[in-house]
Image (cartoon, grey):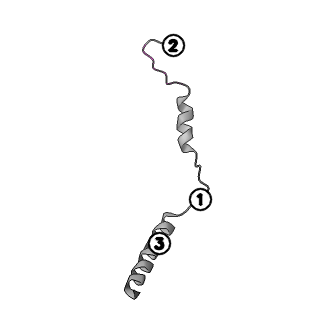
Amino acid sequence: MKPGKIQAPQSSTGLMRFYDVNTSNIQLDPKVVVGFAIAVIIVIGLLEIIK
């Protein structure tokens, strides 16, 4: 190794790959989540008006 040359530990590459792994099998489009939240807000609002 040349003097002054910096080497990263070999295990650092494995850590970067660890965060690339997608562990969830549920894949939802953000539009679906926002739409569901808006629908819940509307239903709650309608229930408050009826009450």
**On the image, numbered disc 2 is attached to which residue?**
1
Nearer the observer: mark 2 or 1; the answer is 1
Would you identify the image quadrant in which residue 46 lies? bottom left
| Rendered position, 13 above or below 40 | above
Q: Amino acid at mark 1?
A: Ile
Cα distance, mark 2 to mark 1?
47 Å
Please report contact status of discs 3 and 1: CB closer than 8 Å, yes or no.
no
Which residues are drawn in magenta? 4-9
Tell me the amino acid under the disc marked 2.
Answer: Met
Q: Residues within 10 Å of mark 1 (few under 14, many from 20)?
A: few
Q: Circle 3 is placed at which residue position?
A: 35
Image spot of residue 23 (x, y percent): 59, 49
Mark 2 → mark 3, Cα distance in angstroms: 57 Å
Quick one: label 2 or label 1, which is nearer the N terminus?
2
On screen, residue 23 above or below 44? above
Measuring 53% from the left and 42% from the top, which residue is drawn there?
A: 19
How many C-alpha atoms fall within 10 Å of the one at disc 3: few (<14), some, or many (≥20)?
few
- Which one is nearer the viewer's eye here, 41 or 5? 41
